[in-house]
Image (cartoon, grey):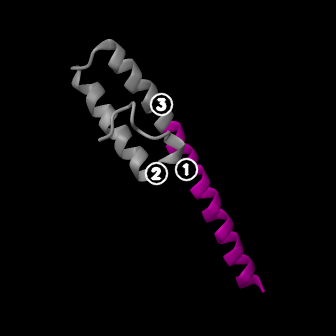
Amino acid sequence: METIESAGAPEDLTFGAALAELEEIVKALESGQLELEDSLGRYERGVSLLRACRTKLADAQQRVTMLVGEIEEDDAE
């Protein structure tokens, strides 16, 4: 896994990459082995990744809704 410093901006990652990194952060935080500062930094990164994932999911949902609407329009013609 990339380190926090070298990882890309959450919005530039694919959904899968952002989710995988988020899962790694959760595991690290749950381990209880991190220093306070590192925990805080990873938590902040995790929040950014979560926001990016939610945005990507909302965008995908909007695209699917649009495509379903197009299919329904085609069927109505």
Amino acid type of the residue that numbered disc 2 sits on in the rendered structure: Phe
Q: Secondary structure at mark 2?
A: helix
Is 8 displayed left or right of 63 in the figure?
left
Is 26 displayed left or right of 44 in the figure?
left
**Horizontal and vertical percent for residue 15?**
46, 51
Which residue is outermost to the front? 6
Residue matched to label 1 = 56
Please say if the residues under marks 1 and 2 sit with CB atoms less than 8 Å apart: yes
Is 47 displayed left or right of 26 in the figure?
right
**Horizontal and vertical percent for residue 17?**
40, 49
Q: Nearer the viewer, residue 36 or 65?
A: 36
Amino acid type of the residue that numbered disc 1 sits on in the rendered structure: Lys
Number of the label disc, if any, that sits on residue 37: none
Residue matched to label 2 = 15
Q: Residues within 10 Å of mark 3 (few under 14, many from 20)?
A: few
The residue at the point 21 percent across, 20 percent down is: 33
Query: Hey, which quadrant is residue 70 in on the image?
Result: bottom right
Number of the label disc, if any, that sits on residue 47: 3
